[in-house]
Every structure is written in structure tokens, then in C-alpha cells.
């Protein structure tokens, strides 16, 4: 007798919840939906993020990306351009050191090289950092995409759910290093 999709999903979630340390509220991985709210730091804006296990690197919507050198290191100046969870259009100019570059294959088969920077964010009410490739995501629904490098440390995804995580960004939390 074949299993229904709902039964298989329920069994999968039960297995995830029963495995010690996999889905915990004490700083371990959480079960998240495929779309969640995160807080971008340092501005503190609440934005919708797509959690995408198909993408290795997280990405962030940025315009006016300008590369430059500072103190012998590669830096980038850019404008974050996004809508917050209340559909307000926001912009913020930032400068960050480039931590690495990624080569992304576009849908048309061409490769695109993007700078990657570290930015703080709050995920499930906890402050952390993530590495983001910078790209103009204005044609996409979600200004933030969280990829596998970030998700592997923070979440298990339930693709049938959205908005499962705690909101906000407590001031007394400690920034977790790495992404």
C-alpha cells in the first residue's frame, strides 16, 4: 500500500524531532519553513528570507557594487536595497571587506563572479553572522537567500511550512562566529 505525502512528511518530522541534538531550542538546529523572517544587522530591519538548500552560498540584494582596496585588502561598497516585512522599500549603504569570491553559474550557462561579505543577522531570535554573495535580487521576491553553508549549522527545512521561527533580535545575545 503506497504512503501518502502527508504521512511521509509526518514520519520525517517525527524522525527529525526524535534525533538528539538535531532540532533543539538550546542553540542547536531548528526546524524552519522555506520562508522565514530574519533581522539584518546593523540596521535591524526585519526582512523575508528564502531558505534554499539548492544554493550553496547565501546571497543578499545589493546595488551599486563598487570594489576598492583599503589597508592592502579587497573591500566592497554597496547599497542594500530591499523591502522589509512591512513592504517598505529600504536602502542602506555599507562597506565590508571581501572574504572571498564565488563563481555562480547563471541560468543561461554563463558564469558570474561575485564578492562575498560577512554580515550580521538574527535568525530564530539569535544573533549570528553569515557570508553573503552580493547580487541585484530586485527581480526576485525575497531580498535574502540563505544557502546550505548557513543552513547546515542552523536549521533543518520543512518545505511545507513558512514563518516557523522566533522573531526579533535580543540585544543581550552573543554573536556566533562563522557562517
Image (spheres, grey):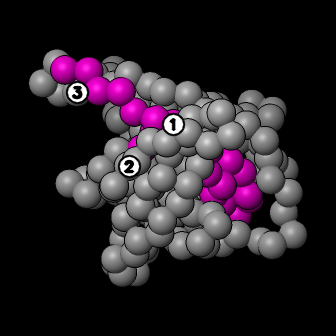
* Span highlighted in magenta in the image: 110-134
Pointer 1 residue? 116
Q: Is residue 108 above or below residue 49?
A: above
Q: Nearer the viewer, residue 21 or 132?
A: 132
Residue 117 is situated, as x and y percent measured from the top left of the image, at 56, 42
Q: Nearer the viewer, residue 55 or 33?
A: 55
Q: Nearer the viewer, mark 2 or mark 3?
A: 2
| Alpha carbon distance from label 3 to label 1 | 17 Å
- Which secondary structure type mostly characterizes the magenta part of the structure? strand
Report the residue at 34% width, 55% height from top: 64
Q: Is residue 69 left or right of residue 104?
A: right
Mark closer to the chain start, 3 or 1: 3
Q: Nearer the viewer, residue 30 or 151?
A: 151
Q: Residues within 10 Å of mark 3 (few under 14, many from 20)?
A: few
Determine if residue 85 is in view: yes
Q: Is residue 17 left or right of residue 2?
A: right
Residue 34 is situated, as x and y percent measured from the top left of the image, at 43, 48
Instruction: State which quarter of the image contains the N terminus.
Output: top left
Instruction: State which quarter of the image contains the C terminus.
Output: top right
Q: Residues within 10 Å of mark 1 (few under 14, many from 20)?
A: many
| Alpha carbon distance from label 2 to label 3 | 18 Å
Q: Is residue 90 above or below residue 6?
A: below
Q: Is residue 65 magenta?
A: no
Label 1 SS: strand
Pointer 2 residue? 65
Report the residue at 46% width, 35% height from top: 115
Mark closer to the chain start, 2 or 3: 2
Amino acid at each position: 500500500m503506497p504512503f501518502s505525502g502527508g504521512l511521509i512528511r509526518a514520519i520525517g518530522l517525527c524522525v527529525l524531532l526524535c534525533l538528539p541534538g538535531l532540532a533543539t531550542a538550546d542553540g542547536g538546529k531548528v526546524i524552519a519553513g522555506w520562508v522565514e523572517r530574519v533581522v539584518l544587522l546593523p540596521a535591524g530591519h526585519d526582512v523575508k528570507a528564502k531558505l534554499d538548500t539548492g544554493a550553496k552560498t547565501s546571497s543578499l540584494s545589493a546595488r551599486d557594487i563598487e570594489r576598492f582596496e583599503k589597508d592592502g585588502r579587497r573591500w566592497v561598497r554597496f547599497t542594500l536595497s530591499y523591502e522589509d516585512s512591512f513592504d517598505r522599500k529600504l536602502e542602506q549603504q555599507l562597506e565590508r571587506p571581501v572574504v572571498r569570491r564565488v563563481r555562480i553559474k547563471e541560468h543561461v550557462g554563463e558564469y558570474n563572479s561575485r564578492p562575498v561579505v560577512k554580515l550580521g543577522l538574527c535568525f530564530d531570535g539569535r544573533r549570528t553572522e553569515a557570508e553573503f554573495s552580493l547580487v541585484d535580487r530586485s527581480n526576485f521576491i525575497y531580498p535574502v537567500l540563505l544557502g546550505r553553508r548557513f543552513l547546515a549549522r542552523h536549521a533543518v527545512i520543512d518545505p511545507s511550512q513558512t514563518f516557523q521561527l522566533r522573531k526579533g533580535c535580543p540585544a543581550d545575545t552573543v554573536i556566533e562566529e562563522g557562517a
